[in-house]
Image (cartoon, grey):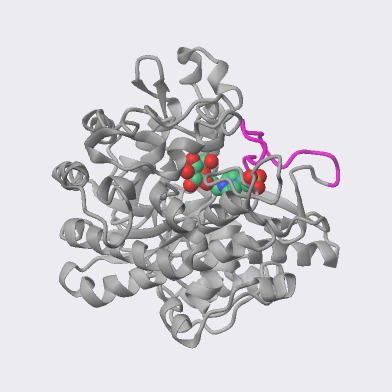
Amino acid sequence: MVTPNTPSSYELPSNFLWGFATASFQIEGSTDAGGRGKSIWDDFSKIPGKTLDGRDGDVATDSYNRWQEDLDLLVSYGVKSYRFSLAWSRIIPLGGRDDPISEEGIKFYSDFIDALLAKGITPFVTLYHWDLPQTLHDRYLGWLNKTEIVQDYVRYARVCFERFGDRVKHWLTMNEPWCISILGYGRGVFAPGRSSDRLRSPEGDSSTEPWIAGHSVILSHAYAVRAYREEFKQKQGGEIGVTLNGDWAMPYDDSPANIEAAQHALDVAIGWFADPIYLGSYPAYMKEMLGDRLPSFTEEEWSVVKGSSDFYGMNTYTTNLCKAGGEDEFQGNVEYTFTRPDGTQLGTQAHCAWLQDYPEGFRDLLNYLYKRYRKPIYVTENGFAVKDEDKKPVEEALHDDDRVQYYRGVTDSLIKAVNEDGVDVRAYFAWSLLDNFEWADGYVTRFGVTYVDYKTQKRYAKDSGNFIAKDHVQQEEKDAPPTPVKNAKEVPPAHGSKRASAVHGKTKENSKRSWKAPLARITAYVSTFLGL
Ligand code: GBH
């Protein structure tokens, strides 16, 4: 085994939260139990051709029935925190603001939250991880109807704050607005599967609908946050924010066009949502690319949207090399590749085509997001699917070397970003606690740190689960967190300045841990002045 190359003096704050993440539809199964209403994934996943293996979410990892076993697993890994999502249609089966609440649904989550807390595990709760109540799609096309969905979502959020907010102190409004909008209403690969491609969907317009859906998602998030802050926060004392997906974008080479392309990729993947929410405006490139297809906010809406997230919830998996060109608006009219100009691959290939292991990109992304948005960062998802893991016998699959290597790389990058670059990172959730229903991939692609034998539903810890538990979770962590940077004014571009310059310069005197790695800090500081 390779030994970690992070200096042993590096530490994370004592209140740093290590944990694992999951989502309701990917693990629960029992889609008819406890009065649950259908979600848009129930029927979608049953349409032939929508999932790789033709399998659906009716059973998944059976976690609706096996939640105690899952909890024991979390305890065995020793994690301090668990990120999971609530199924809207278990809580309000028909979804709408005038529809009845299911006490059975409430009780399921309430008991689970109590059990987590009894074991000293902090719940991070996602309100929406893609399982829209089917009724809301049937009634008014879900995210395409801003007026209706905002009201229905805010009422759902209020019910959750009322019923669980006495115990839940970390709320995530939405998981990955880009995926909700682009994959659901543009590419049409995720429910509700709308697209201009008539081979894929009888209805939909990929040139307009994703941008409309994204607009509704931002507003629903923002009005729910306002409700929380005005009606619950004072009494309950929690925090609330959004979780965005976004992979690091690296220019393919040094050409100005490709450097610009990498920024365009970030503007569409991340800035589309993060700029309005944290900075109060759209990236100029979004407007340039879309013109009046980009829905605008009213003054009053901007006042609700701007500043509507207490932290930056970061889901990230890989790095893309970016080349100017192509006609894929969903990538900002940028081409992605993993093949470098010299023909080599960026990193180890995962089971899914879109994922290679490149830990340096993880560190660069942390720096970029912290510099640009100036919020404490929670890494709410990060993970790897080993190639052909599904074809291996269980004993072999448990030795998931590529995943261990991946986690070694990113956690190393994370610790350096905190200690050398001064980035304020407060939590890290590996995706995922379990192999589970991987959306359009069905059960073929496995992201778990725990192997699930779908025939018996037995769980087996993989080497990666044990790696995270032993190398990180169970380590003693003593220090206090670094103080976040305040009063950030300018928004630097991704590739104009080198890593750490702005971040490091501002936080060095605040960081309680700067003395721990004096040499590294001095080196970084000097590099900044030399413009390296
Ligand atoms: C996460 O999304 C999800 O939150 C989680 O539910 C899921 O299980 C996990 O990833 C693993 O996939 O080639 O245009 O289809 C990850 C973000 C963004 C990664 C879209 C895949 C493919 C883009 N995803 N990306 S496309």
Question: Ligand 1 sits in which quadrant?
Answer: top right
Q: Relative to 31, is 444 above or below?
A: above
Q: Position of residue 409 (x, y in %)?
A: 55, 42
On whether residue 356 falls in the magenta region, the answer is: yes
Q: Is residue 75 left or right of residue 264?
A: left
Q: Relative to 355, is 442 above or below?
A: above
| Residue 21 seen anywhere in this rendered image of the structure | no
Q: Position of residue 193 (x, y in %)?
A: 58, 45
Secondary structure mainly formed by the magenta segment: loop
What range of the chain is rendered magenta?
341-357
On whether residue 347 falls in the magenta region, the answer is: yes
Q: Is residue 162 left or right of residue 96?
A: left
Frontmost residue, 15 versus 204: 204
Q: Position of residue 108 (x, y in %)?
A: 20, 41
The residue located at (22%, 74%) in the rendering is: 231
Q: Is residue 464 left or right of residue 91?
A: right
| Residue 474 seen anywhere in this rendered image of the structure | yes
Frontmost residue, 152 versus 409: 152
The image quadrant of residue 151 is bottom left
The residue located at (47%, 68%) in the rendering is: 146
Q: Is residue 110 left or right of residue 223?
A: left
